[in-house]
Amino acid sequence: MPNPSPSVQPAGAAIVTTCERGVDTDRVGPALERLYGNVYATVHNFTLESGLDDCYTYTVRRGEELLTLLVFRLRKRRAEVLNEVIALGTEEIDAFARHVFAHCAEVDVVACRAVETPRYRGPYPCQQYDYLEDSMLMLPSSVAAYSESLSKNTRRSIKRQERDAQNELQGYAFQALDPEHFTDEQVREVIGLNHERMAGKNKQSGFDDAAERRLVALARASGLLGVITVDGKVCAGTLACRAGDNYFLLVLAHRNAYNQYGIGFLCCYHTICACIERGGNELHFLWGRYDYKRSFLGQWRNLDRVLLYRSRWAALRHAGLAWRAWRQARQRRLMLWLRERSHEPTPLFSMAFAVLQRLRGWRHQWRQRSLMP
């Protein structure tokens, strides 16, 4: 992609858009963290995921104020934005697409993944669908204020479970550890709890070897490791990583033998308190619609995938991509519809949901085998 000189948009002389080849990590890294405060929009995460060798940096400023900062790469006639789990206005996405289409003739598609954005109403042909969800908690200034904001039932459950654990589990204790106080092996031990718990449900853990290495690297850079030990043995754990003033809960797991004590629930609660004590502004529970997130006052927000095509002809040229996006959108809707009804006693719903879960597990295993050397 050419490296044009800064272009001033006519709507306001102070708005300046630039696009440059490469990523100046010393400059872009801190700027991303200040602007988005999101672990999925950091130079460190981009490097761990796919590297930065062939990336570009797109920037929009109003005077000295940074408005938009996107890192993207060109691949298969697509401009793929690496920033994820961030909020983008439709005007930001539209301006980015307009800039890319104007300066890079070979690009037919602009792709954003897992972004919070209103429905696109701009001039380009668009596919937009619900891709993931995030549950976000705005953290108050004190643990006392947070505890008071919880429902009476949630507070009662925490007190009862904490009392039972302290009375019946020898050496029960919770620790919140910053990077200088935990080892990589402790992070792997918490991830191992997830493998153990998924195996107990006859499910495949989402953390393969590559994901584990990435989590260890993220933890080493900005992690908060929460662990509950019983008689010196780790029985529950969390891994949250910080970006700016915000925390992102990447792992939450516990040993199945302690289900009756709600030990995973307790570990999550104490981790939230630890984030508050460290001055956190937001805690993101991330994907998965689970009741405990609502109990802890998480608020859902949808994250969309957005594909903008240069023209209708470009959409036809990329019919395979358009078809896959359409299919994934329908699969997502079906999964959510079945999940909402999975608690119903109707055998048909239960069977359909179980079949869908099994198919997803087989697909995951097939993908893992295909990646093996």
Image (cartoon, rainbow, N blue to C red):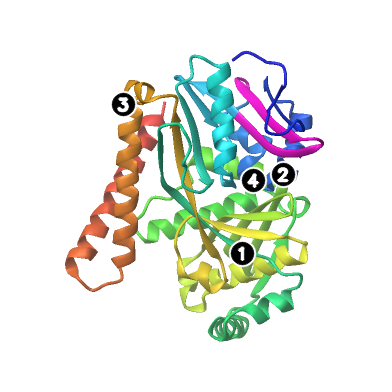
- In the rendering, which numbered label is found on residue 319? 3
Vertical position of residue 10 compared to residue 245: above or below: above
Residue closer to the observer: 324 or 201: 324
Q: Nearer the viewer, mark 3 or mark 1?
A: 3
Which residue is tagged 2? 35
Where does the image place residue 355, in percent across and percent down from the top left? 23, 54
Left or right, 63 with respect to 236, comes to: right
Residue type at mark 4 is Val
Residue at 30%, 40% in the rendered image: 327
Along the polypeptide, which appears first: circle 3 or circle 4?
A: 4
- In the rendering, which numbered label is found on residue 307? none
How far is disc 2 from disc 4 in space, using C-alphas? 12 Å
How far is disc 1 from disc 4 in space, using C-alphas? 16 Å
- In the rendering, which numbered label is found on residue 137? 1
- In the rendering, which numbered label is found on residue 39? 4
Where does the image place residue 336, in percent across and percent down from the top left? 34, 57
Along the polypeptide, which appears first: circle 2 or circle 1?
A: 2
